[in-house]
Amino acid sequence: MDIGATLLDDVVSKIAQIPGSRTFTVSVIVSQPRKSPASVFPYAPNVHEAEVYIQDILALVAEDIHVEGMNGVDQESVPGLEMPTREAVYVSAVELVLYTLPKTSSAIVYVSKVDSTGQGKRPSPTKTLVLALLEHITKRWFGANITNDEGKAERSGWNIWVHLFARAQNQYLFPASIEFPGKKVLSDVGLVKWWKGVLDQFTDTISSQSPASIPENRILSYVTVPGLTSLEVNQFLPKRPAGLIGPEWLIGNPYSNTSTLFPMDVQPPCSISQLIPYFPDDPKARLIDEIANTTSKASATIVSEPRRKKRKLDSGEKEMDGQAQGSEAEETTLDFVQTVSAEEFWERMDGRQECRLGTVAFFVVYVDQSASSLGA
């Protein structure tokens, strides 16, 4: 099956529903899956034995807009002018990274970057583009198949984890787009509200649409804003719009939920190296690296085999001894990460410079699509 073409069809269908007389051009690029065991949980024990695949997804939307001529002259007002009066310009883009872990039937969708140029008409297609991608991946690629008369799942779906962090920036995917006067950059709080609205609509759609609608109690939505208390976060989070269904938002993170099976086939309490995903350009990943590289040896419990003694007359044994030391050093690094609990990890996030004063928000949506949850 050509998953790229199918995804494109769904995105085009959603974009076409945007109100108004407008012309869009949609492009979707999906890379081939490649095996990358250490890409998302690089410090997990025995990570190189894990079966993990990674794909990159890029979606772009261009819109035909009216073009003005030289010196601000309106080309459409000049009879006989042969220069084109309309051109397609990029208005929205979304970049995703998809990780699949077949052993636990889990898929992790990381919303890496979202950007717009401000050059198109209103409303912007950005929100529609994000929703189309998330809905298609969740339901089409990894959802349960419902084909029998009783409406029960004949094929179990995969569990989906949607991760993103919201941080206001002038531009992400369109270089120099901030120079266009029509581009409006949301504030930190405004961006958090925008993302909550997008994810509210996402959970509503997958909860209410058939086939394979997902019970509301099988979806968990989390938001964490380092540097702010739960009360402070609740004060600026908008309420769910009337008519939308879905779970109540939980202020915090999922990594202490002992009833949830995580993609690496573990349940808390366990090492953060097996719980917290490691994403490109993610503040959490930088902290994980920092913990792995700077935690003092005295604070970790080191479990390793005793070093072999070197034999003066056998150079081969000396070389083997050096290899053993390298293995011990690698095991020590892993142990450093394992000594930090999920609670301590988020306490450290509160104090990091890039996360202070509520400038970054982390969103996680967990969708349980297993056959048992769908009534099969």
Image (tube, rainbow, N blue to C red):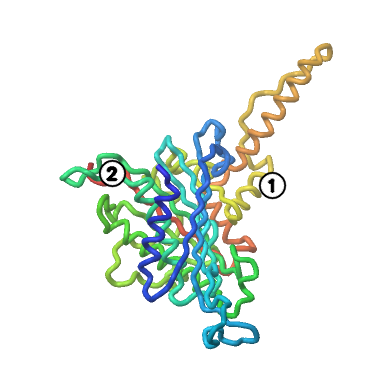
Q: Residue at x 44, y 70 (%)?
A: 23
- Mark 1 residue type: Thr
Residue farthest front in this picture: 80
Q: Residue at x 34, y 62 (%)?
A: 248
Classify residue 374 as left or right of residue 141: left
The 10 Å Cα crowd at callout 1, few under 14, some 14 to 19, many 20 or more, is few
Residue 12 coordinates in the image, percent (x, y): 40, 60
Residue 317 coordinates in the image, percent (x, y): 76, 16
- The picture quadrant where one finds residue 178 is bottom right
Q: Nearer the viewer, residue 64 or 191?
A: 64
Residue 128 coordinates in the image, percent (x, y): 41, 65
Q: Pointer 2: what residue?
A: 145
Classify the position of the C terminus by image quarter: top left
Question: Can residue 1 be seen here?
Answer: yes
Mark toward the start of the polypeptide (2 vs 1):
2
Residue 371 coordinates in the image, percent (x, y): 28, 42
Q: Pointer 1: what residue?
A: 294
Q: Is 95 placed above or below 103 here?
A: below
- The picture quadrant where one finds residue 260 is top left
